[in-house]
Image (spheres, rainbow, N blue to C red):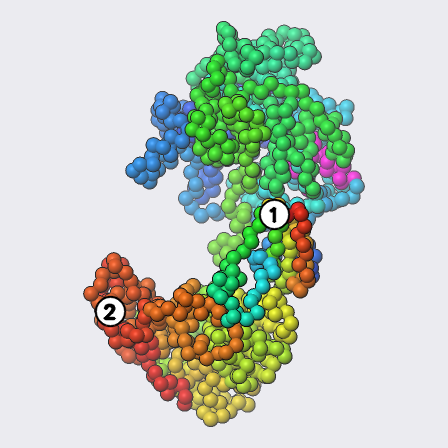
């Protein structure tokens, strides 16, 4: 005989029947039920199998502390693993499965593990499977010991995020939370009151308790009415506080649609709230402790307080024939409630020798048998408890004498209460042991107030006083600490402490024997308090058992620091919109639509969507790249270079400042001139390169690589603000103010000459490495004669909004010359042919200027600059450093980037001489070209080398970097 | 953390970047110092347990750098002051 539905239940609506499916069978429940309460009402007592031993398990708790009834909700992409049945709200057509039963909950093949229980003690996995290879065993163990299945598909749901501010955030919707919100709300403060569950009122909802002389439910209803009328108070149910951080920052997870039928759900499934509160009031209640005796994990054994909640909230009686085992008053109150609802109380077993006389008198009046100074020794049963053996406790707390047999269908236990101090601890709050409760209480901390059960205050009256801001000193009747029940000093190996992780008192004894005596070591060695439990059920009991074993006080053993999240939270909640295309914004070029219309294939380069190439019909990408290179080398091409970094540096000290930033001397640059310059970090490593232009005496344009502009803008400011605040300099990143078109090729000047312009593009009037401002086709433009391709080249920058007419004008003027749009790959091929450095390809975190051909530049400058001192360390000055060279590769295929360069006659196994850093097919010289960083490379020009890549050998030769127009004649035209 | 930017007032930690230990002095003439002194400037940091000097940037705010005294054990900000302000003494509660 097991439980079923009886009268009462404040949360359920008996007029609305809900159909659902559990473990392959159809059931019905009522609106307001949880999956757990509905199954209990249907007489279900077996909810799953345990983690390691696959023992049958039933419901232990009524909330987030439930360790056994862990379910896999829904199927396919919508599936969610490891939810507690006691926290899943029922909705029509809900589909759920137990997580740990294979092939079924009633017939579990893995239960064979239970036969080997004595061989799978604490740390068994670590010890046994270390040799020869954990990886061999892991898949098997994962199948045998595991929780639910992760979804295989991408999460189809949407998650929202928002921030909020308030004067007081009250966490917990029980009597304490409601009272605190009322007190704060009545003073006009901005208050947020949140509760994790669907219903308000906490543990006392629907109970016989009186609050301010009213029945609890009536008080709760009137409190909610008053709060709803206060404009400065916001109420949020189904909103669980999962993380509590510094200075009043709390993360809340609101379950927006999880309680609705799948078909009715729209919008965000869950919502992350980031709340910054002036004061955080923790009214998070307390968790009841189980008692640790043999077979205490049988289905039908439940926490006494949970049985009361199932009755009061859902009108469900968990059993008909009950034994209550307790060490404190609360077990008696539960017994009385359940007896009134129609259960037969077989016996109340209290570990204390002298419980309060009023409780004894009540039991006597109800005809309930009472055993004082006694405790359960062993539960008897298979898939459900059938009886319990009870024995007396001696003065040391050991079981002794003859045991007594009580037949029952349900055993309720209460081992005392642990204040839910998780959120207090997460924010750095300290804990202290309370000897009456035998548990940990929060120490006072600025900005955080704990109330009610969370503060170890189990008196409604005292809690109401504290909620109004008065300091109270709650007094609790001492519980009798009985951490593990056995007849000897040795704990029982079948007395469960952590049900979810299958850790028994015997496992803790093994850990203690092997000297894992701190609570942090105990946790990691036995897995106590891990997984979704995170110490809710087991933490304090584990410390208690260890304290008993080591004869050391609990406070000397310590507590683990609790960390967020309080309860497992979907990663999607934290990701919010930052998934897929929302992760990193795709930046599009000013003329993106033009490139697409011109047939460009677009890909991402450093966050920018840029044309790879513009393949024509019937052309491969490689053919398109080669055609584009030839067009630039022989005619004229056009590429959009808008992402190139542009930082304006202005002020009387701008030149002096840039002298300190660059390896080059910038102050000698004349207005209207450009200079290629190299920037190091303070470690002497090459950080960036680019063209610096002096626009005016006190005004510079600093060109950076596309990917580094934000970092460089920030670094320039850091030096100015932190190191040289006396320099009169302003900086501004103007990268996206100016769109840039680069016209390159021997016919580039012909194209510009055909346009109406205030600038004289003549070779003498506008030489290489100079800069002009003026108008082109009526558009204000900044033009620099600089080149990354090695051809005559003009970089034309115009205000972003004006670039479309410039493109039109240039392509029209270029048509007679066969103007060809070209992509990044053609540009990169040309720069490899020219042997130009590409920061990030040729350079890594150890590359210094002398390694890439700038030794003379480094030696020439007399004044200090960032990183200079670091280029004078012994390692920087030694011979044989890797140096940038070209590699001529035999054959027709380009070499792989990353392929190793090995001296002839040597094998890769005895060391690499360097590696290929850039590689391409050169249509210009009709051969593969490559750049490489090679040990002592500059001195080895002409040397034959072998090239190794993933087991494949090729032959090649070290050559000069520049393979095309080494004299630069084509630039100077 | 809630960081009291000298320019913007208290703002969420998410808007800031920690720039490491504060009051690191760059040698006046780097060429004149030996490798040990230079390495000390580049790499060696106090990393105290408790109060320590740091510099922070209000990166997604005013863009200004400033100094703080922060406890590494409980994240308490004991002082916030400008880059050019004198360094406060930490006192005995460090
Ligand atoms: Zn600011």
Residue at 60% x, 45% y is: B73
Q: Point out the image quarter for the C terminus of chain A.
A: bottom left
Tag count:
2
Question: From the viewer's perspective, is residue A947 above or below residue A646?
Answer: above
Q: Do the residues labelled 1 and 2 touch (CB within 8 Å)?
A: no
Q: Name the residue under label 1.
A: B50
Magenta region includes residue A181: yes
Give x and y (percent) for residue A117. 38, 23
Give x and y (percent) for residue A943. 24, 73
Which label was assigned to residue A385? Answer: none
| SS for dot 2 | strand
Residue at 70% x, 12% y is: A358
Q: Give the range drawn in magenta.
A: A169-186
Direction right: furthest residue: A187
Main SS category, magenta section:
helix
Q: State the residue in front, A373 or B83.
A: B83
Magenta region includes residue A518: no
| SS for dot 1 | loop
Which label was assigned to residue A945? Answer: 2
Which of the two marks, 1 or 2, is nearer to us in this view?
Answer: 1
């Amino acid at each position: 005989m097991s439980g079923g539905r009886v009268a009462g239940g404040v949360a359920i609506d008996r007029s609305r029947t809900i159909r659902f499916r559990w473990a392959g069978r159809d059931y019905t429940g009522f609106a307001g039920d949880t999956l757990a309460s509905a199954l209990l009402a249907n007489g279900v007592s077996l909810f799953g199998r345990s983690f390691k031993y696959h023992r049958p398990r039933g419901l232990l708790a009524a909330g987030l502390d439930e360790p056994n009834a862990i379910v896999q909700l829904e199927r396919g992409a919508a599936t969610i693993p490891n939810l507690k049945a006691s926290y899943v709200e029922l909705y029509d057509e809900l589909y759920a499965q137990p997580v740990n039963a294979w092939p079924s909950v009633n017939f579990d093949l893995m239960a064979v593990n239970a036969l080997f229980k004595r061989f799978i003690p604490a740390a068994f996995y670590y010890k046994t499977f270390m040799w020869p290879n954990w990886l061999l065993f892991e898949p098997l163990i994962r199948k045998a010991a595991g929780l639910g299945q992760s979804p295989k598909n991408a999460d189809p749901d949407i998650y929202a995020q928002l921030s909020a501010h308030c004067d007081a955030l009250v966490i917990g919707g029980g009597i304490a939370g409601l009272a605190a919100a009322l007190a704060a709300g009545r003073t006009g403060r901005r208050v947020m009151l949140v509760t994790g569950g669907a219903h308000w009122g906490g543990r006392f909802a629907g109970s016989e308790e009186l609050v301010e002389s009213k029945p609890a439910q009536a008080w709760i209803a009137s409190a909610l009415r008053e709060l709803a009328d206060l404009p400065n108070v916001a109420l949020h149910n189904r909103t669980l506080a999962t993380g509590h951080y510094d200075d009043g920052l709390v993360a809340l997870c609101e379950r927006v649609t999880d309680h609705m039928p799948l078909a009715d759900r729209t919008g965000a499934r869950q919502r992350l709230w980031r709340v910054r509160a002036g004061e955080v009031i923790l009214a998070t209640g307390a968790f009841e402790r189980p008692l640790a005796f043999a077979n205490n994990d049988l289905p039908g054994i439940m926490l006494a307080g949970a049985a009361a909640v199932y009755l009061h909230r859902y009108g469900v009686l968990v059993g008909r024939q009950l034994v209550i085992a307790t060490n404190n008053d609360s077990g008696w109150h539960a017994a009385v409630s359940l007896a009134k609802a129609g259960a037969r109380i077989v016996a109340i077993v209290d570990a204390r020798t002298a419980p309060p006389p009023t409780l004894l008198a009540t039991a006597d009046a109800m005809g309930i048998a009472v055993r004082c100074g006694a405790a359960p020794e062993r539960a008897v049963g298979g898939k459900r408890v059938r009886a319990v053996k009870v024995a007396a406790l001696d003065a040391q707390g050991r079981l002794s004498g003859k045991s007594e047999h009580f037949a029952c269908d349900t055993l309720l236990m209460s081992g005392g209460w642990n204040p839910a101090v998780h959120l207090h601890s997460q924010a750095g709050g300290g804990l202290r042991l309370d000897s009456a409760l035998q548990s940990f209480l929060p120490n006072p901390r600025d900005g955080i107030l704990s109330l009610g059960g969370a503060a170890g205050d189990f008196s409604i009256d005292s809690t109401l006083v504290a909620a109004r801001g008065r300091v109270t000193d709650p007094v609790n009747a001492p519980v009798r600490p009985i951490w593990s029940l056995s007849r000897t000093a040795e704990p029982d190996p079948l007395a469960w402490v952590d049900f979810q992780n299958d850790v028994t008192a015997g496992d803790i004894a093994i850990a203690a024997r092997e000297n894992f005596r701190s609570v942090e070591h105990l946790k990691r060695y036995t897995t106590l308090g891990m997984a979704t439990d995170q110490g809710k059920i087991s933490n304090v009991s584990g410390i208690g058992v260890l304290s008993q074993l080591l004869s050391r006080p609990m406070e000397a053993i310590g507590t683990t620091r609790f960390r967020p999240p309080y309860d497992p939270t979907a990663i999607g909640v934290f990701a919010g919109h930052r998934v897929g295309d929302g992760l990193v914004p795709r930046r599009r070029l000013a003329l993106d639509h033009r490139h697409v219309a011109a047939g460009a294939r677009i890909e991402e380069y450093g966050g920018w969507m840029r044309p790879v190439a513009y393949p024509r019909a019937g052309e491969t990408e490689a053919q398109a790249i080669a055609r584009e290179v030839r067009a630039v080398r022989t005619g004229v091409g056009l590429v959009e270079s808008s992402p190139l970094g542009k930082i304006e540096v202005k002020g009387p000290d701008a030149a002096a400042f840039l002298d300190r930033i660059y390896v080059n001397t910038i102050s000698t640059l004349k207005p209207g001139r450009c200079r290629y310059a190299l920037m190091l970090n303070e470690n002497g490593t090459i950080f960036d390169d680019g063209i610096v232009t002096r626009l005016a005496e006190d005004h510079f344009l600093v060109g950076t690589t596309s990917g580094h502009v934000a970092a460089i803008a920030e670094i320039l400011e850091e030096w100015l603000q932190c190191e040289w605040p006396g320099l009169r300099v302003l900086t501004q990143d103007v990268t996206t103010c100016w769109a840039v078109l680069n016209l390159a090729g021997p016919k580039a000047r012909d194209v510009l000459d055909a346009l109406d312009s205030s600038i004289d593009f003549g070779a003498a009037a506008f030489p290489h490495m100079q800069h002009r401002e003026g108008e082109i086709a009526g558009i204000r433009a900044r033009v620099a004669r600089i080149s990354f391709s090695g051809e005559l080249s003009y970089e034309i920058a115009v205000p972003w909004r004006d670039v479309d007419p410039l493109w039109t004008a240039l392509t029209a003027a270029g048509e007679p010359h066969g103007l060809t749009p070209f992509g990044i790959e053609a540009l990169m091929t040309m720069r490899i042919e020219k042997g130009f450095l590409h920061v990030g390809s040729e350079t890594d975190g150890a590359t210094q200027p002398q390694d890439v051909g700038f030794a003379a530049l480094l030696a020439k400058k007399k004044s200090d600059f960032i990183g200079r001192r670091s280029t004078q360390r012994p390692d920087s000055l030694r011979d044989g450093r890797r140096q940038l060279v070209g590699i001529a590769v035999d054959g027709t295929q380009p070499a792989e980037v990353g392929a190793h360069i090995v001296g002839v006659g040597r094998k890769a196994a005895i060391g690499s001489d360097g590696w290929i850093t850039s590689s391409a097919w050169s249509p210009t010289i009709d051969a593969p070209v490559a750049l490489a960083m090679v040990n002592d490379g500059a001195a080895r020009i002409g040397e034959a080398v072998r090239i190794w890549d993933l087991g494949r050998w090729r032959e090649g030769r070290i050559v000069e970097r520049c393979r095309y127009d080494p004299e630069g004649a084509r630039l100077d035209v | 953390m809630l960081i009291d930017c000298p320019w913007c007032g208290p703002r969420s930690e998410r808007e800031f970047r920690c720039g490491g230990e504060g009051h690191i002095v760059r040698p006046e003439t780097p060429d004149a110092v030996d490798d040990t002194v230079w390495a000390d400037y580049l790499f060696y940091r106090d990393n105290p347990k408790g109060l320590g000097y740091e510099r922070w940037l209000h990166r997604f705010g005013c863009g200004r750098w400033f100094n703080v005294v922060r406890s590494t054990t409980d994240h308490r900000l004991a002082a916030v002051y400008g880059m050019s302000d004198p360094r406060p003494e930490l006192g005995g509660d460090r």
